Amino acid sequence: MKSTNVALLILVVTSISVGFAVFTDSMFARAQETGSNVISSFNATNRDGNVTIGKLIYEGVGEINSQTVIQGPTIQTSFSSNDTISIGANSVKATEIGTYTSTPKANGVLYGEGKGVITGPNNEMLTWTSQQIGTMTPQGKIIFHGSMFFNTLSPVGGLAYLDSMPAVFSFEVDASKNTLTRVWELR
C-alpha cells in the first residue's frame, strides 16, 4: 500500500480513536525509508485503551451502477457487489448495494459519505454507514479509505456478529467502473 493510502487510513482510524491528528510528510518518508509496515504495527492509545485494526471482515467485487450530480461538484454514486464475509473460520457469500456522495476538496482530495445494505444467507440484512476520503491515481482509479459502522436488522444469524461493529475500509473504483471493497474490523 502506498504511503499516501496508509496516511489516509491512519488519519481516519486516529480521528475515530484519539481525536484529530496531523501527520507530516516526513513521518511517512521515515516509514518508507525503514520499510516499516505502518498498518500492521498501528496501535494508538486513547483514554479507554488501545485501538487496533483487526482481521479482514469482508471483500467485495462489483461495479458502479449509476452516477448523478446532486449539487455543484457533488456526485452521488450507486454500486452493487458480490461479497465474501468471514465468520470465524468460515465464510459466507452475500450481495451488497450502496450509495455514496463524493465532493472534491483542496489538492484533489474527495470527501464522501455513504449508506448501504448487505444481504446474506437466508435473506439476513445488515446496513452500514460510512465516511471516507479519496484520491485519484494517474491511471484514473479512485481509492477511498474510511470508517464504517454496521447495524443488523436481526439479532440472530450469520451476520449478527457485525452488529454495532466499527470498521475501516478501502474502496477502489477503476477506470472501467469496477469496484473492489476490503473491510477490516476496528477493535
Image (tube, rainbow, N blue to C red):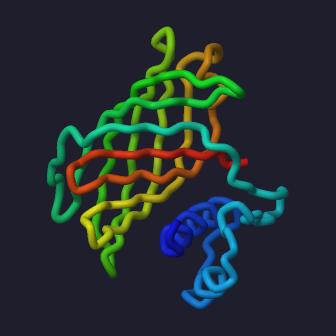
Q: Looking at the image, which residue sits at the far top?
A: 122
Q: Quadrant of residue 86?
A: top right
Q: Is residue 42 positioned above or below 34 on the image?
A: above
Residue occupying the point 59% across, 87% down: 29
Judge by depth and name the residue closer to the eye, 16 or 3: 3
Q: Residue 66, position in %: x, y? A: 18, 41
The spot of residue 135 in percent (x, y) is: 36, 68
**Whole-percent x and y of residue 87?**
65, 27
The quarter of the displayed image where residue 116 is located: top left
What's the residue at 81%, 58% (across, down)?
50
Q: Residue at x 60, y 46 (%)?
A: 184
Tell which residue pokes out farthest to the bottom in this image: 26
Image point (80%, 65%), residue name: 45
On the image, which quarter does residue 69 sit in? bottom left
- Where's residue 57, x and y in %? 60, 38
User: Residue 37 vs residue 171: left or right?
Assistant: right
Q: Is 112 on the left-hand or right-hand side of 130?
A: left
75 vs 1: above or below: above
Is 93 placed above or below 33 here? above
